[in-house]
Image (spheres, rainbow, N blue to C red):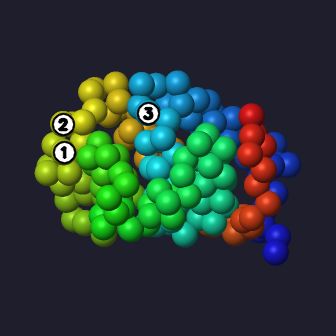
Amino acid sequence: MDARLNIFGNPTAGKFLKHIVSAGQVVAGSPLPAATQELVKIRASQINGCGYCTDMHTKEATAAGETSVRLNLVAAWREATVFTEAERAALELTEQGTRIADAAGGVSDEVWANAAKHYDDDQLVALVSLIAIINTFNRMNVIIQQPAGDYQVGQFA
């Protein structure tokens, strides 16, 4: 299976991705916990059906020490006992922020308030930014049908 476009060899895509990656580096260096960042990327990627990003972020999370139990339960986080209350709040914000079109009001006040109980303003900015960034990557990869499975940890470092 081949992607519809080679975004890794296209100069316009390269310029665009450079800026998105740069924005992602700001979030990576933020006070939002690294484990939470990976869980958010995985959950949004699952919702959007982005195999490439799901592959990438599960492998990166594993390399960073995340357990297979937690990774296997991200899609069923509501029923899982392995996530902290803060992680659960981030996952719920991720779901509502990713599924904006499914809810007339976007992110509910209740979900926002729950996230705000667990994260300070800098962490909330990072969390919202991360949700926007991973959704951008997901949409690009789904539209061009970027194949999944071959990602190597640290491939884009």
Q: Are marks 1 and 2 in contact (CB under 8 Å)?
A: yes
| Image x and y of residue 94, in percent | 37, 53
Q: List the residue tagged with mark 1.
A: 114
Dot label at residue 33: 3
Q: Amino acid at mark 2?
A: Lys
Dot label at residue 154: none
Mark 3, other Cα within 10 Å: few <14 / some 14–19 / many ≥20? some
Quote the CA–CA distance across marks 1 and 2: 5 Å
Q: Residue at x 24, y 42 (%)?
A: 115
Q: Amino acid at mark 1?
A: Asn
Quote the CA–CA distance across marks 1 and 3: 17 Å
| Image x and y of residue 73, in percent | 44, 64
Q: Quadrant of residue 49?
A: bottom right
> Left or right: where does residue 4 sit relative to residue 81?
right
Tag nearer the camera, 1 or 3: 3
Circle 3: element type: loop
Dot label at residue 117: 2
Q: Residue at x 66, y 52 (%)?
A: 59
Q: Quadrant of the C terminus?
A: top right
Q: Earlier in the sequence, mark 3 or mark 2?
A: 3
Q: Is residue 41 visible?
A: no
Quote the CA–CA distance across marks 3 and 2: 15 Å
Mark 1, other Cα within 10 Å: few <14 / some 14–19 / many ≥20? some
Q: Is residue 87 visible?
A: yes
Q: Residue at x 44, y 61 (%)?
A: 74
> Left or right: where does residue 142 sit relative to residue 115?
right
Circle 1: element type: helix
Q: Please tell me whether residue 53 is drawn above or below residue 23 in the rendered image.
A: below
Circle 2: element type: helix
Q: Please tell me whether residue 142 is drawn above or below residue 90 in the rendered image.
A: below
Which residue extends farthest bottom? 1
